[in-house]
Every structure is written in structure tokens, then in C-alpha cells.
Image (cartoon, rainbow, N blue to C red):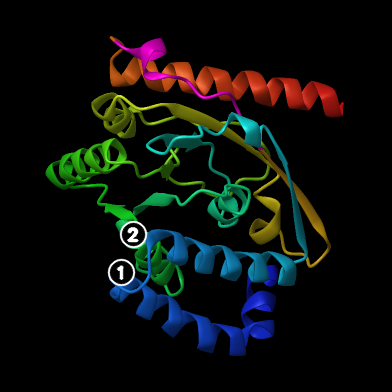
């Protein structure tokens, strides 16, 4: 929390400038392409990263599909997660976020700017509608970042929590490539009461083509993706030991 407050204080004038700008870009898609809006989001995210004294390294960026129309599923650790991943992802990408969290100041402007989807935890019909909309958008060439763990609580390590399989129905319906993503130490930037420099890491695993999971149910795809992320976590842990 200390680092988050520090960033807000140090970037007060930037916030006063960029928040209205993000809102304006989001309201006028006829003037600003998805690429333009994504570049603005990345610019803002990089300013936050630098002010927060965070460095993120990347592995496997060559695994990101060349053609658009895929979904990335990543483990979830804290407020820095989406920022850390998207700064290393050059192609335009949107997000799926809990509706309540997405209404928070700045988070709202980011989700609107990226044309993201909001999901309501206790409304099954709304969830189905959102997942169907996402599937259609991905078929049409959009990319999405999803955190199947849902919330992140008070994470203090890199262990994976339970993956919720519901969000994988969108990938099954879209018949799209899936990119598993592992994030490491991402709980540290805004989850630890410190201003010390922090290093995090993002690993983009090889994309899983639809042919590899065709015929699987959403629950099976969920377990398959989590297994790959867990295997990479084990590998990274062993390497750093």
C-alpha cells in the first residue's frame, strides 16, 4: 500500500492529465484506433512502473502468436499483474475484470480504454453473456488477458491458487490459441509495505493451438493450462534455487 500511495502522490499531476485523456480516448473510438488506445495505456503503465521503482523481465515473448485472436491466461498475485504483463505484450490486448474492482478510480479508465469486459461474480446469466461476447470478439481478432484465479487476496508467495474453469468456456467457444502466462514476484510491488526497488518476471509459455485441446471440456482445459503454468513455476523455482 505504501508504494501505491507513493505513486499517487508523485504522479498527481500526471493523473490529472492522463485520466481525462484516457476517458476521452475511450469515448471516441472513431478517432482513436484500438492500437492508439493500447499505446496510450502502455505509456501510462510504464510511467507507473518507473515511479514505483519496479523492473520486469520477460521470457518467451516469441511464443506470442503472430496472428491476433487469442487468449492469455495468467496466475494472479496483485495490482501490478496486468501492468507487468501488458508492458511486455506489444499487440493490442484487452482484459476481463471483476465489475466491482473495475469501478475503482483509474482501474475504470484503464478498462474502458482497453475496451475490456466486466464480469459480475454473483450473476451467472451476465457471466455467460460476457464470455460469449468475448469469444465472438476473439474470433474477430481481438486478444484478451484473463486471470482464472479470480482474486488474489493477500499473496506473499508465488504459489498458485485454484483456477476457476468458467472463463475457459470463452476460449473453447472461440476455438482460439491459448497462451499460458506465469508471473513471478508480482505480489511485491503493491503488496509489500516498502519502497525498495523490486524485480518481477513474466514468462509467456508456448501457445496451445485449438487442435491441442479440441474436444476437451472447459474444466479439462483449465486443468491443462494450470498444469503447464505450474510446471514452469517449478522450473523457474528450481533454476533460481
Task: Let me know if residue 1 appears in the view.
Answer: no
Q: Quadrant of the C terminus?
A: top right
120 left or right of 86 in image:
left
**Residue 36 x/y as whole percent:** 46, 66
Which residue is nearer to you in this view: 58 or 80? 58
Q: Is residue 231 above or below residue 27?
A: above
Name the residue nearer the viewer: 225 or 139. 139
Asked if residue 13 lies in the magenta stretch, the reply is: no
Which quarter of the rendering shows the N terminus?
Answer: bottom right
The residue that label 1 is drawn on is 29
Q: Alpha-carbon distance for marks 2 and 1?
A: 10 Å
Residue interval drawn in magenta: 203-214
Q: Identify the residue shown where x is 23% and y is 27%.
A: 173
Q: Earlier in the sequence, mark 2 or mark 1?
A: 1
User: x, y (%) of residue 201?
Assistant: 72, 42
Q: Which residue is mark 2?
A: 115
At horizontal 37% and vertical 70% (from top left) the residue drawn is 32
Question: Could you tell me which secondary element the residue under label 1 belongs to?
Answer: loop
Amino acid at each position: 500500500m505504501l508504494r501505491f500511495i507513493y505513486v499517487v502522490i508523485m504522479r498527481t499531476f500526471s493523473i490529472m492529465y492522463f485520466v481525462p485523456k484516457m476517458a476521452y480516448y475511450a469515448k471516441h473510438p472513431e478517432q482513436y484506433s484500438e492500437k492508439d488506445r493500447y499505446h496510450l495505456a502502455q505509456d501510462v503503465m510504464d510511467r507507473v512502473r518507473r515511479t514505483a521503482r519496479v523492473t520486469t523481465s520477460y521470457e518467451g515473448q516469441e511464443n506470442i502468436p503472430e496472428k491476433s485472436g487469442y487468449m492469455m491466461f495468467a496466475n494472479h498475485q496483485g495490482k501490478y499483474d496486468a501492468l507487468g504483463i501488458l508492458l511486455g505484450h506489444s499487440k493490442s490486448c484487452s482484459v476481463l475484470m471483476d465489475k466491482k474492482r473495475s469501478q475503482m478510480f483509474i482501474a475504470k479508465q484503464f478498462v474502458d480504454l482497453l475496451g475490456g469486459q466486466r464480469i459480475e461474480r454473483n450473476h451467472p446469466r451476465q457471466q455467460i453473456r460476457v464470455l460469449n461476447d468475448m469469444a465472438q470478439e476473439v474470433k474477430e481478432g481481438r486478444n484478451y488477458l484473463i486471470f482464472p484465479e479470480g482474486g488474489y487476496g493477500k499473496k506473499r508467495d508465488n504459489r498458485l491458487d485454484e483456477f476457476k474453469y468458467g472463463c475457459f468456456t470463452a476460449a473453447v467457444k472461440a476455438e482460439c490459441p491459448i497462451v499460458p502466462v506465469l508471473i513471478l514476484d508480482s505480489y511485491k510491488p503493491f503488496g509489500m509495505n516498502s519502497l525498495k526497488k523490486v524485480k518481477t518476471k513474466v514468462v509467456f509459455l508456448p501457445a496451445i493451438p485449438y487442435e491441442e485441446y479440441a474436444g476437451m471440456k472447459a474444466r479439462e482445459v483449465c486443468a491443462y493450462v494450470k498444469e503447464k503454468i505450474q510446471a514452469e513455476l517449478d522450473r523457474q523455482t528450481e533454476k533460481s534455487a
